[in-house]
Image (cartoon, grey):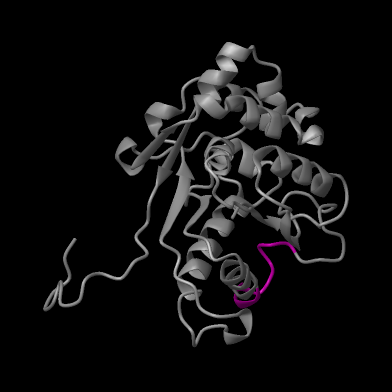
């Protein structure tokens, strides 16, 4: 579950390509941008490269682009219960073993849509397991694991100066928070092809796809070749544990 078209390719393109190559069924839910127009078409092309099926777009407005979803509220302004219900329906229909979303910081730049997508994804994945919540959204489904894509301090590397040069923030997490590190070098060709499919972003000066497109391959591969994740707990604890007091 990602906020914008291109987030899926930049943050988890390697893992998506890896799992698709291994025969897993993968899919991407995008919370903003209308399911029509050039960003939708670009997303469809990127997901085709990654083997992640057709776009699943909620169609809310981008917090920083009024043209993203004409006539629709911004994701930040939409009723919370409505957004959660729509994501619960996606979870229950797709029945994923694993869900990936943004981290609480909002991926380096702290985009408000990233942060809010993190919040609603956590709420929806948890709610999807309870039959009495959103019964109209389908039969309950317990996702096995949820991962937040993140950037630890030590993993920012050459990306930090590239972002600050165009006036963007660089927000990273303590290294200990990144509990899973994935070397995606074997899938870099697909990941980069998926990023390049977001042509409007590659053509821009400030979007990350455009910044990366102006780098040499060696520098770009160093930035894109590792993906980092942290794993909030979803599964219930064993019966009878922790009785009598709260523990860290």
Measured from the top left, where is residue 169 in percent x and y?
56, 35
- x 15%, y 77%: residue: 240
Res 192 → quadrant: top right
Q: How many marks?
A: 0
**Magenta residues, start to end:** 74-82
| Rendered location of residue 242, percent (x, y) | 15, 72
Assess whether residue 189 is covered by the magenta stretch.
no
Which residue lies at the image location 85% right of the left edge and 52% below the top edge? Answer: 67
Left or right of residue 154: residue 156: right
Q: Would residue 208 appear left or right of 39 to someone viewing this image?
A: left
Give me the residue at 46% from left, 49% from top: 148
Give above or below for 130 relative to 47: below
Question: Closer to the camera, 138 or 234?
Answer: 138
Residue 207 in view, yes or no = no
167 left or right, relative to 141: right
Q: Is 45 situated left or right of 100 in this image?
A: right
Which residue is at a point 60% across and 64% down the rendered structure image? 94
Asked if residue 48 can be seen in this view, the reply is: yes
Placement of 36 over or under 244, stated as above or below? above
Whole-percent x and y of residue 222?
51, 19
Q: Quadrant of the N terminus?
A: bottom right
Expressed as whole percent of the image width and height from the top left, the position of residue 163 reads 60, 27
Residue 95, relative to residue 6: is it above or below? below
Q: Can you name the residue that lies furthest to the left here?
A: 244
Q: Examine the residues drawn in magenta and state their main secondary structure.
A: loop
């Amino acid at each position: 579950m990602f906020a914008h078209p291109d987030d899926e390719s930049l943050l988890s393109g390697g893992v998506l390509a890896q799992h698709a190559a291994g025969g897993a069924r993968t899919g991407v839910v995008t919370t903003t941008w209308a399911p029509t127009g050039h960003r939708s078409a670009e997303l469809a092309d990127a997901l085709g490269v990654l083997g992640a099926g057709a776009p699943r777009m909620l169609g809310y407005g981008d917090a920083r682009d009024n043209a993203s979803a004409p006539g629709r509220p911004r994701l930040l302004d939409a009723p919370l219960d409505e957004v959660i219900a729509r994501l619960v329906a996606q979870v229950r229909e797709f029945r994923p073993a694993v869900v990936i979303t943004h981290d609480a910081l909002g991926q380096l730049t702290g985009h408000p849509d990233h942060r809010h997508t993190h919040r609603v994804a956590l709420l929806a994945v948890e709610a999807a397991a309870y039959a009495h919540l959103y019964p109209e959204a389908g039969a309950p489904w317990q996702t096995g694991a949820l991962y937040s894509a993140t950037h630890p301090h030590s993993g920012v590397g050459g990306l930090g100066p590239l972002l600050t040069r165009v006036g963007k923030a660089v927000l990273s997490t303590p290294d200990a928070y990144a509990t899973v590190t994935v070397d995606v070098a074997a899938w870099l060709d697909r990941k980069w092809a998926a990023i390049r499919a977001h042509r409007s972003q590659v053509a821009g000066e400030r979007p990350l796809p455009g910044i990366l497109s102006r780098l040499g391959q060696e520098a770009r591969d160093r930035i894109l070749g590792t993906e980092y994740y942290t794993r909030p707990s979803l599964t219930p604890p064993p019966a009878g544990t922790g009785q009598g007091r709260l523990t860290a």
